[in-house]
Amino acid sequence: MKRSEINALQREAVAFFEQQKFYLPPWAFWSVDEWKEKRAKAQEVVDNKLGWDLTDFGLGDFYRMGLLLFTIRNGKIGAAGGKDYAEKIMIVREGQVTPWHFHWHKMEDIINRGGGSLVMELCNATSDERLAKTPVTVQVDGVTKTVEAKGALSLQPGESVTLPPYLYHNFSGEPGKGMVLVGEVSRVNDDEKDNRFLDAIGRFPQIEEDEPPLYPLCNEYPEI
């Protein structure tokens, strides 16, 4: 992806957050120069990779399969005295898919915070971590719901689903309903060791630096 595309997506995200009355912490808007000045006082942000995040899953087609997100808070698995929870806010576009995956450790609530409809497909995992053919039972805002294997829930604004470990899921924005503001409240998030994707994929996009960054991504702090 070009840096100019990422900058445009960040500007679009800020406008959408404001439209939905969702507000980010002040450091979300620090420039690269401000990060150079203030980085030492924001070590928790750096260590836990908080902040702007964007992935095309290594496929080079962000609008078909990709995700823009912002990690607001997080800790480290097994760290004594640290946060044992995490929170993210995400923007899911119409028809834009986050592919099949589960987490070995993390339990999470995925919440439609506003905008369009979030389509969430669910599937149990087999013992060898493939897609099972058994029905899936989950809690939707405390109400038990069951869908068939690879069945879908349509989460409307205000609705959420609880996803336990080892439950495969993918999600996308329902076409024709607009972008979706998606929240995630979970146990500690560890993208390096706790994501089991059904198919091998990448993580961060290759970036062509055609203009300076608007806001650095969470994996770019060490380079500042």
Image (spheres, rainbow, N blue to C red):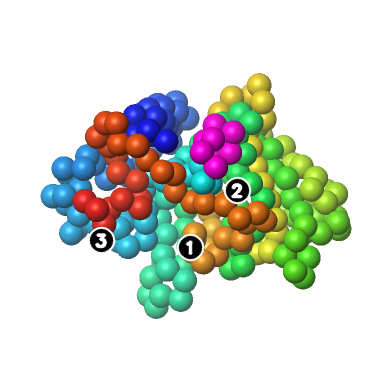
Where is residue 156? Give x, y as percent: 66, 34
Magenta: predominant secondary structure element? loop
Residue 67 is at least partly visible in this image = no
Camera-side residue of 196 and 209 = 209
Where is residue 103? Give x, y as percent: 61, 62
Query: Mark 2 highlights which residue?
Result: 110
Residue 120 is at least partly visible in this image = yes
Relative placement, left or right, of 127 versus 220 is right
Relative placement, left or right, of 89 versus 134 is left
Q: Residue at x 47, y 71 (%)?
A: 77
Query: Mark 1 highlights which residue?
Result: 192
State which tag comes first along the sequence, 3 or 1.
3
Circle nearer the viewer, 3 or 2: 3
Q: Is residue 147 above or below residue 9?
A: below
Is there a contact, CB below 8 Å, between mark 3 and mark 1? no
Residue type at tag 2: Ile
Residue lying at the far left in this picture: please name it. Answer: 37
Circle nearer the viewer, 3 or 1: 1
Q: Which residues are magenta?
A: 59-67
Q: Is residue 14 above or below residue 81?
A: above
Q: Residue at x 16, y 43 (%)?
A: 33
- Mark 1: few, some, or many residues within 10 Å (few <14, many ≥20)? few
Residue type at tag 1: Glu
Relative placement, left or right, of 13 versus 91 is left
Residue type at tag 3: Gln
Is there a contact, CB below 8 Å, between mark 2 and mark 1? no
Where is residue 72? Give x, y as percent: 40, 50
Cα distance between the residues tagged 2 and 1:
20 Å
On residue 62, the disc is none
Quarter of the image with the N terminus is top left
Relative placement, left or right, of 173 versus 67 is right
